[in-house]
Amino acid sequence: MQEIIFATGNEGKMKEVKMILADLVLDGEKVSIRSMKEAGIDIPILENGKSFAENAGIKAKAVAAFAKGAIVMADDSGLEIDYLNKEPGIYSARYLGEDTSYRVKNQNLIERLEGVSERERTARFVCAIACVMPDGRLFTKEATIEGWIGYEEKGTNGFGYDPIFMVYEYGKSTAELSEEEKNAISHRGKALRAVKEELR
């Protein structure tokens, strides 16, 4: 059975990945999808790239060195807010410190946008997924979802910045969408489906 190891320790992200890739069949076989933790890989990875794609590639290559015979995927994703010069960007996970709760991060961003009109609160989630094949070949797919930053946290689904990211199509935050609705339009959903097509 072909195995995919996804280089993340984020359980919310892993749940999305497993849902979106659940129907992936390669060479007539279902694919086993495991996180780094489930695969027993625990290594420090220095994400010092200058873009989402670079950071995803760094993670995927680092884990691939310990994952013989498996396909390794890694994503780097984050929130870009136009009014704040595309912050927090590639530092989204580390914004205000890695151990800072997203409730604090979200509140900080809302406060920084105080008095800014909805028209100027445009933002996007970006996701780059790097995939390292067992033969060492690497390819990357990138996707975005456009929206704007709300005035307060809304919704309890999702994780991270989802409660403050408002989606135009639904007039709701990504944390108010069902898992199916979110995966259909999200940056990670789009990027993963592009990777799936490439693998097939």
Image (cartoon, rainbow, N blue to C red):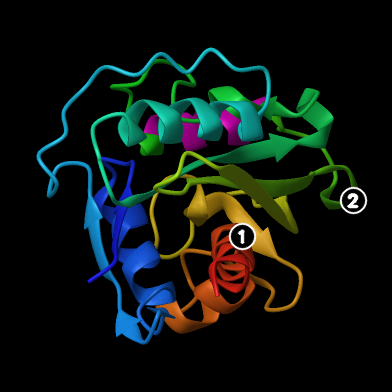
Asked if residue 22 is among those painted magenta in the image, a careful observer would answer no
Q: Is residue 4 above or below residue 151?
A: below
Q: Is residue 179 above or below residue 88?
A: below
Residue 116 image-quadrant placement: top right
- Label 1 sits on a secondary structure element that is helix
In the rendering, at what x and y percent does residue 14 appear? 31, 57
Amino acid type, residue under disc 2 in the picture: Arg
The residue to which callout 1 is attached is 191
In the rendering, at what x and y percent does residue 124 appear? 72, 48
In the rendering, at what x and y percent does residue 59 appear? 43, 30
Disc nearest the viewer among 1 and 2: 1
Relative to the observer, which residue lies in front, 90 or 87?
90
Asked if residue 108 is among those painted magenta in the image, a careful observer would answer yes
32 displayed left or right of 148: left
Q: Which mark is residue 119?
A: 2
Magenta part, dominant SS: helix
Residue name at image x 48 percent, y 60 percent: 154
- Label 2 sits on a secondary structure element that is helix
Quadrant where the image shows the C terminus: bottom right
Q: Is residue 116 above or below residue 118?
A: above
Q: Residues within 10 Å of mark 1 (few under 14, many from 20)?
A: many
For marks 1 and 2, give the CA distance: 27 Å
Q: Is residue 64 in view?
A: yes
